[in-house]
Image: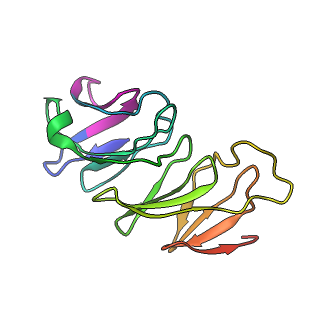
């Protein structure tokens, strides 16, 4: 993920186990890093807005994190804005109207405030009638105007209106 900073510079952001790195996209040189509790799989793509990077991971620990991009060296204490629970193992979030939205691999629709990490919404979506046990959802949702659209292995196609007033069915 390339992040544009207020001073016109850009940084390449990469999440790795236990850290987030800010690199020069021109040279690959490490500019800064922040220690996190994302201790394993950091598969979801980061999202960014206004110089803040939102990164998730869920295995073995779930700990979404918001980090202000920029800086030099270890920015753990100065640039981490918040970290919270209930992240995403594989699916990436979308950012809209100041909120992060995603459906996690267990089939829960989630919404948190991007500035604070405060949970606004978490609800299990209904599974398909012939669903097996396991993880029903690995696809990232997409934002279409004021709706979030998704589907999964054992979830019917669904549409969530921002604020998560659910409508289900074929899209």
- For image coordinates 48% across by 74% down, the residue present is 163
State the scheme by which the image is colored: rainbow
x then y, percent, for residue 127: 75, 58
147 to 141, vertically: above or below? below
Q: Quadrant of the C terminus?
A: bottom right
**Residue shown at 67%/66% (left/top)?**
158
Q: Is residue 19 magenta?
A: yes
The quarter of the picture where residue 157 lies is bottom right
The mark total stands at: 0
- Residue placed most toward the observer, 8 or 17: 17
Q: Is residue 170 left or right of residue 148?
A: right
Task: Report if residue 100 lies within the magenta region.
Answer: no
Q: Estimate the x, y position of residue 9 in percent, counting from the top left.
A: 19, 42
Q: Image quarter for residue 20?
A: top left
Q: Residue at x 47, y 46 (%)?
A: 87
Work out whether 37 lies above or below 105. Answer: above
Q: Indicate left or right for 68 with 45 as reference.
A: left
Please state which of residues 107 and 30 is positioned toward the viewer in this rendering.
107
Residue 128 falls left or right of residue 58? right
Whether 20 is drawn above or below 54: the answer is above
Decide whether the magenta segment is chiefly helix, strand or loop.
strand
Camera-side residue: 46 or 107? 107
On the image, the x and y values in percent for residue 75 come to 17, 34
Counting from the top left corner in percent of width and height, residue 52 is at: 27, 50
Which region is colored magenta?
A: 11-31
Q: Quadrant of the N terminus?
A: top left
């Amino acid at each position: 993920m390339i992040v544009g900073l207020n001073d016109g510079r850009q940084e390449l952001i990469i999440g790795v186990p236990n850290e987030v790195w800010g690199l020069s996209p021109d040279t690959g040189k490490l500019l800064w890093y922040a220690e996190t509790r994302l201790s394993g799989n950091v598969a979801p793509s980061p999202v960014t807005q206004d110089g803040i990077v939102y990164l998730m991971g869920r295995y073995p620990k779930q700990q979404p994190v918001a980090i202000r991009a920029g800086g030099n060296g270890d920015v753990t204490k100065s640039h981490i804005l918040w970290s919270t629970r209930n992240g995403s193992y594989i699916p990436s979030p979308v950012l809209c109207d100041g909120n992060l939205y995603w459906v996690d691999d267990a089939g829960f629709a989630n919404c948190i405030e991007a500035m604070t990490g405060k949970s606004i919404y978490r609800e299990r979506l209904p599974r398909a009638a012939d669903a097996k046990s396991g993880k029903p959802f690995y696809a990232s949702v997409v934002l279409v105007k004021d709706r979030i659209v998704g589907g999964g292995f054992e979830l019917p196609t669904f549409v969530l209106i921002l604020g998560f007033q659910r409508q289900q069915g074929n899209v």
